[in-house]
Image (cartoon, rainbow, N blue to C red):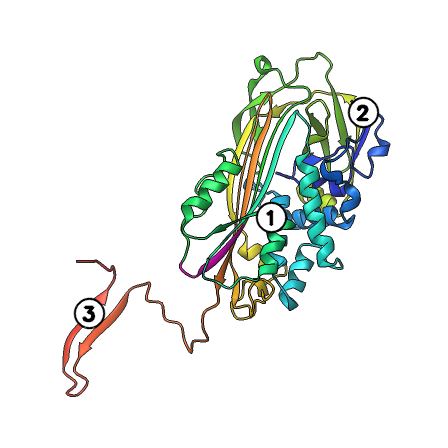
Amino acid sequence: MSHLKTTAAWSGFLSATLLLTACGENSPDAENTADAVPAEEEPDDVSMEDVNEDVPGSTQTFGWNLFDHLLQEEENQLLSPASISTALAMTMAGADGETKQEMTEVLSLHGLEDEEIDASFQALITLLEDTGSDVELAIANSIWKREDYGFDDTFIEKMEEEYQAQVEPLTDEEPINDWISGQTNGLIEDMISEVRPQTVMYLINAVYFQGDWAEPFEESLTTEGTFTTSTGKEVDAMMMRRAEKEPVFLHSENDAFQAVSLPYGEEERWSMNVILPHEEEGSLQKTVDAFRNEDPLTFSEKVGNFRLPRFQMEEETTLNEPLIELGMPKAFNSAEADFSRMVEGGGIFISEVLHNTFIDVDETGTEAAAATSVAMEESAPGYDFDMIVDRPFLFTVQDEETGVLLFAGYVNKPEEG
């Protein structure tokens, strides 16, 4: 175990949560680590030189901005910035004009050429999946397209080649849900409730992670304890601890929080950073702000009394409003969205961005999964008005010539005969 470790901003590319970060031999600060693991030859000669240096950090910036936007102190929260970024980057590859400009700003990818973005995501997926033998990580992309719709061949080829996306026909939700379940080891089920008639494509990313602690907690020492929520309510929690009398941890502390880094596997390339804001009012926001400002964590070995609750979380989030509020409204506007590089002439928009996550943390390690789905729909024709009769209504049946009112009615609940 190293005596000093710095986790830099780019290392959060695959944060399955904001506690789970990559901090291995490819980190820009790995030279500061006394026992850094020697870099192995990457498959197909892919290396960090194939990744634009701004892309991983941009992804983490976007992740923390979104996390901060969604954060409610009284509620649990679980995001995979990597999954969301990848799904949106795939979608952005079909955008143009102001729609594309807004998306690049929100994803913090402004100033980069399309080729740099696409090639960087392609290389990162390859690099991240080469985790070694003691951590399992799978990243998969797919697109599901209506066969009778005129998608641009260049866009489809880019999805297959640059994002390694599986291309399938869009029929109903069952094959999509089966694919997501298969890619996440069954942790995310029935993500898509139905495929609407006007939906022409789904762009989907799925992530699965499983890692055992380099130094596991001793299950026989797990005891019931008290966890105090943000509202002051005390709840029961099973608190884990290590077996050593004087356990050594990688620890960091500043005026906003203290943190412990828990490595996975023998190579210790991956780790969970457990970040505990101080009890003073405002420390939670101060902690989030520190990460949004890309302040690195510097850990050093210390003997400590560290206890962590076992926990399991499962979240389902619709990201339309948060993404609009962060600055990309045109992509969701049927009249203004420009996805003309996806479909000749455009005429489609993002109707829904769904994000489902799961994580289970216990004495042996962590299992986590995430999936992000971007649904594209046809823009409605230029109607003079919209009238969708989906709530109580009145009706009449009359003779237009004599004015005789034959029937008058009110429907509160439609019933079929």
Q: Secondary structure at mark 3?
A: strand
* Mark 2 and mark 3 residues within 8 Å of each other at the beta carbon: no
Task: Name the residue tied to disc 2.
Answer: 2
Alpha-carbon span between mark 3 and mark 1: 48 Å
Q: From the viewer's perspective, is 362 left or right of 33? A: left
> Picture coordinates of residue 407 (x, y %)?
15, 74
Task: Name the residue tied to disc 1.
Answer: 84
Q: Is residue 403 above or below residue 282?
A: below
Q: Residue at x 71, y 38 (%)?
A: 127
Task: Name the residue tied to disc 3.
Answer: 409
* Mark 3 and mark 1 residues within 8 Å of each other at the beta carbon: no
> Picture coordinates of residue 140 (x, y %)?
58, 42
Q: Is residue 198 magenta?
A: yes
| Mark 2: amino acid | Ser
Q: Is residue 36 magenta?
A: no
Q: Residue at x 75, y 40 (%)?
A: 46
Camera-side residue of 37 and 404: 37
Q: Over which residues does the magenta segment extend? A: 197-203
Alpha-carbon span between mark 2 and mark 3: 78 Å
